[in-house]
Amino acid sequence: MEIQEKINILFWRTGFYGALTVGGFGTLYQSITNEFLKRNHKVHFASGGLMDLHPDVDFHLIEYSKLLRNFPEVLNFPYNQKSSKEILKLINKHNIDLLYLQHHDFHYGLDLLKKKTNIPLILQIDSIEQWVKQNWGGKLYFKNMINWCEEIEVQSADAILVISETVKNQLTELYDVDQNKIFISPSGVDTDKFNPSIKGEDIRAKYGLIGTDYVIGYSGLFNLYHGIDTLVKSIPAIVNEIKNVKFLLIGDGQLRPEIDDFVEKHHLEHLVTITGLVPYKDVPQHLAACDILVSPFNSSANTTFFNSPIKTFEYMAMGKPIVTTNIGELKSICIDSENSVVMDEGSFDSLAQSILRLKQNDELRTKISKNARDFVVKNFSWSNKYNLIMEVYNNLKHKK
Amino acid sequence: MELLVNLIGNAGEMIKNTNLNNQNIKIIKIDEKDLAKPKKIIKLLKSGDYSNVYFGTIDLRFLRFEFFMKLYMLLSFHWNGAIIDEKGNKINFSLIKFLLIDIPKIIVEVIASVWQIIFHHLKVFIILWKYKKK
């Protein structure tokens, strides 16, 4: 039996997320650091903002400038120098074996580290930053700069982990990058934390949901591509079909004002509960409180949906019946009538009909719930990601 | 009636921990990016004849766009307004402090920002040029 070497790994999260600790990035880091801790590696974490991590993680806050906080993007520029120097100190002080950085806009700190250290540098890229700025709200400032920084990071990294084939293709089109150093590493789910035996009665009671209520649930940030607006705008059509239906929307985000307005204008307050952000540890109980879970993702800006959504994997791991779109990367994950019911992207009627179809068919609900759980346990547990990181690390270590 | 403009975070915690009157406060959620729309924000602050307004966030340590929030309070004549967080921390608006501290500070920030933009554009351009030359 091969004995796995114990390493000192340093995760580096740049980007100004402020005090926000939940969302996809929070889940990713909690989960992947736990995978390393479980196997007795020493885990260090440096971040520009707070993180909700296991107490055994050695956490270091590297704060952004207090002065440059009133104009967009500028605060990222000096942070490169400051954070890279701090990271270098941590690498030397703790004898770090591997650095794992999630790419963020206007970050080019890997260049300095490449010159000053010989440890393997792994870069994770979830999206092309220029595209995100242009299509997911806000304005794109310093277009050249955002691309230049991204290219420097790509060139400096020893290996790049991308979350999907689509991101790999986008990266390859934009930059002259060695294909051999790109690895596809989708998101995952902790299948012990999210499992079908979790009870949701307490959550139902907390939000006044009674036993006969048929609860449609959504969990995640209220951002553009998640399709939360599609779900909310479908509520009048769903209510027409199912009389005792209620909606539990778990999360918050950019589209919240729009969602609140719609609910108020259509007098849906008695049917819709919006929990706001909930601690990640409480998410499984919230999902357990629902009868059907919905993830109506949309491919905004006519681009192939490139994400590897943790939300979908968490739904599947809970063994709940799911209504979802199967755009882009989801095509190979969500199969209609096998592990989910697939709706048409952006269609209110299709979403309502899919929910009705599930509610009326006990056999279908049971079948897709079981298949979904089996599918993620086999293919999308976080240990798959851990194994890939260690494999890449071992290869890089031998090369260096 | 008072107004809490919630940028991000749990409004209930903000109200409880800053001892605001839960029965007398309207909560409106906006996105941080909306702070770049002065007309929209000032219209919102003036809309309901509110006796006072608050901007709410998770943690003041990580606050951005503080100057603009204060500027909107000034322009909507809510000079007793404040920025609050979930832990009960508060930055009260003060006209004197705004004129004597915040305005000079924003001038320094503008100058420093211009310098940062020029310096880092040049630096990044040179680093990338070196990579491409290799």
Image: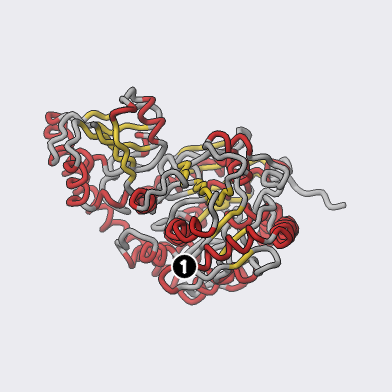
Q: Residue furthest top?
A: B19
Q: How many labels sit on residues?
A: 1
Q: Where is residue A199 in the image (x, y as percent from the top left)?
A: 67, 39
The residue under the point 14% across, 38% down is B74
Is A33 displayed left or right of B19 in the figure? right
Q: Which of A134 and A42 is in front in this view?
A: A134
Is A378 displayed left or right of A341 in the figure? right
Q: Which amino acid does label 1 sit on?
A: Gly
Is B107 displayed left or right of B28 in the figure? left
Observer able to see residue A381: yes
Q: Which of B18 and B60 is in front in this view?
A: B18
Q: Position of residue A124 (x, y in %)?
A: 55, 58
The residue under the point 29% across, 36% down is B26
Q: Is mark 1 on a helix, strand or loop?
A: loop
Q: Position of residue A130 (x, y in %)?
A: 39, 65
Q: Which colour scheme is used?
A: secondary structure
Is B75 displayed left or right of A186 in the figure? left
Q: Where is residue A165 in the image (x, y as percent from the top left)?
A: 58, 71
The residue under the point 51% across, 51% down is A220
Q: Nearer the viewer, residue A346 or A32?
A: A346
The quadrant where residue A387 appears? bottom right
The quadrant where residue A108 appears? bottom left
The residue under the point 34% across, 44% down is B29
> Given the image, what chain letter belongs to the residue carrying mark 1?
A
Observer able to see residue A391: no
Quarter of the figure with the C terminus of chain A? bottom right
Residue that badge 1 annotates: A346
Q: Residue furthest bottom?
A: A173
> Quick one: label 1, few (<14), some, or many (20+) residues within 10 Å?
many
